[in-house]
Image (cartoon, rainbow, N blue to C red):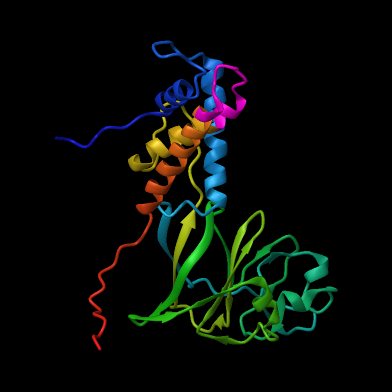
Amino acid sequence: MAEDFTLILREMCERALRISRFTATGETSSPNHVTIASNAMNSMIKRWQSKNIHLWEMEWITYPLSTASSEVVGSDGLNYKCIRGHTASSSNKPVTGTDWSTYWLQTGSSGSTWVDATAYTCIADFEINTDYLSIEKSFIRYSNTDYPVSLIDKNKFFEVSDKTITGMPNLLFLEKLTTRKIHLLPQPDIETYVLHCYISKKLKDFDSLLDTPDRQNSIDAIVYGTASSLLDENTSDKIATEYKYYISNKARSYRKDMRKYEKEFVNNDFVKPCY
């Protein structure tokens, strides 16, 4: 027997509408009601994401640290290496810019002419996909050996007094603004390190009525969760409070069952000693 059962978004919306009694059994849901259910479903997915219900959206990614930091020649004729990625402007121009030391370090031997509005890069910080929410684990692979990298927050990152030190990176700060940017400390001293990260991604929205959920064990949790939300919008006097509690409890139960599948199962052969 093939395990190919699935429901598309429209079918899940129609089922949620029947459970929430917007649509009677045997009736066809109106396009307007399907839209309402779809919006409720996507809003719920966003709430799940804020509660870290996204373990099925995990990915192991690698970043070869092979792009050397930009080098330019300052107005004093000396070489300067980029220590923070940026777009060039008068305020960060080496030597003369009011904030140049935030972005440049006087070192290097192969600088080119500094050019305004140019994107200068640093090997120690770079942008990553905005769909990536967080980094769970990280390490540096070098010469077939893996070295752990500790994840730090912005407070720890800014407590490091000298961010120009070079060596094998052992600290990582993920900056979460409109973009996602990785910052490494120390700055890589060679260009053959490879950064490995285990990341969590944003849950996918349902954009089309033909979309299917990422995991089939989540269908009941999605449908009943949506139905529970829709019941709050159904002002019919015919819906008893007890029924709303019943659907809410069903939604909670299905969500709990779904989260069981997010758990990592490992072998543990450790036997407790007997005394």
Image location of residue 150, percent across then percent down: 51, 78
Q: Residue at x 75, y 76 (%)?
A: 102
Residue 259 vertical position relative to residue 237 in the rendered view, above or below: below
Q: Residue at x 76, y 79 (%)?
A: 101
Q: Residue at x 78, y 75 (%)?
A: 100
Tell me the quarter of the picture where residue 213 sits. Answer: top left
Tell me the quarter of the picture where residue 27 sits. Answer: top left
Would residue 121 appear left or right of 60 to someone viewing this image? right
Image location of residue 158, percent across then percent down: 70, 77
For the record, the magenta segment spans 229-242
Q: Nearer the viewer, residue 210 or 190?
A: 210
Q: Nearer the viewer, residue 266 or 6?
A: 266
Q: Residue farthest to the top? A: 27
Can residue 217 be seen at all in this image of the molecule? yes
Name the image quarter holding the C terminus: bottom left
**How many numbered markers are drawn?**
0
Image location of residue 123, percent across then percent down: 56, 73
Can residue 82 be seen at all in this image of the molecule? no
Tell me the quarter of the picture where residue 161 sits. Answer: bottom right
Q: Residue at x 17, y 35 (%)?
A: 2
Q: Residue farthest to the left? A: 1
Residue 154 vertical position relative to residue 162 in the rendered view, above or below: above
Image location of residue 68, percent across then percent down: 55, 74
